[in-house]
Structures are given as structure tokens and as C-alpha cells.
């Protein structure tokens, strides 16, 4: 049994998940990605510095700890 996959204009569908680039600012270098399923969704803002900010479906900011704190790459 294969998992459904489809490329969209700004992302892709994979199984029940849809990944979409919703906003971006080329000058400032940030992008917002939305990941949604039939149950919930979240948004991830990625700054040009690599810092990520997560928001839940209510628009509330979620706390995230850096995985490689203090290391490059």
C-alpha cells in the first residue's frame, strides 16, 4: 500500500499532511511554512539566521529549545 503524495504550487501533500509555504519575505530572508493534517495544523516561521518560531492552530506561540545550541551546522 502506498502513501498518497502530490506536489502543490507552494508545497506538497503526503498522506494526511499538507506542507505549504504560506508567506515569505525575500528582502528580510524569512519564510513561514504551514503543516496541516485533518486533526490540526501549525505554522513555522524560519528566520534567515535559522531561528524557528512555532505557532499552534490558535496562533499561540509555542516554546522550542534549540537542538544544537552553541554548535554550527
Image: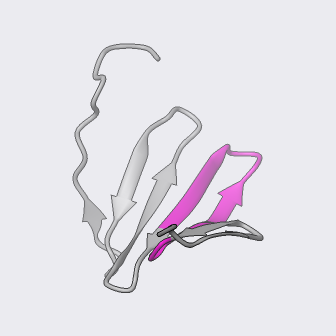
Residue 59 forms part of the magenta stretch? no
Q: Position of residue 20 (x, y in %)?
A: 60, 67
Q: Position of residue 65 (x, y in %)?
A: 22, 39
- Residue 24, compared with residue 9, is above or below; it is above
Residue 29 forms part of the magenta stretch? yes
> Which residue appears at 25% of the width and 47% of the height?
64
Say how the picture is coloured.
one colour
Left or right: 69, with 52 as reference point: left
The magenta span reads 15-34
Judged from this view, the residue extending furthest toward the front is 1
Number of marks present in the image shown: 0
In the image, 44 versus 10, the foreground residue is: 10
- Residue 12, compared with residue 52, is above or below; it is below
> Which residue appears at 41% of the width and 78% of the height?
37
- Residue 24, compared with residue 69, is above or below; it is below
- Residue 45, compared with residue 23, is above or below; it is above
In the image, 9 versus 21, the foreground residue is: 9
Q: Position of residue 10 (x, y in %)?
A: 72, 66
> Which residue appears at 49% of the width and 35% of the height?
50
By secondary structure, the bulk of the magenta-drawn segment is best described as: strand
> Which residue appears at 53% of the width and 32% of the height?
49
Q: Position of residue 34 (x, y in %)?
A: 51, 68
Judged from this view, the residue extending furthest toward the bottom is 38
Left or right: 45, with 62 as reference point: right
Which image quadrant is residue 12 in? bottom right
Amino acid at each position: 500500500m502506498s502513501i498518497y503524495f502530490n506536489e502543490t504550487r507552494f508545497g506538497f501533500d503526503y498522506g494526511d499532511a499538507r506542507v505549504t509555504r504560506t508567506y515569505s519575505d525575500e528582502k528580510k530572508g524569512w519564510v513561514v511554512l504551514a503543516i496541516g493534517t485533518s486533526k490540526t495544523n501549525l505554522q513555522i516561521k524560519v528566520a534567515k539566521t535559522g531561528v524557528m518560531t512555532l505557532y499552534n492552530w490558535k496562533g499561540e506561540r509555542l516554546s522550542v529549545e534549540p537542538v544544537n545550541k552553541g554548535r554550527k551546522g
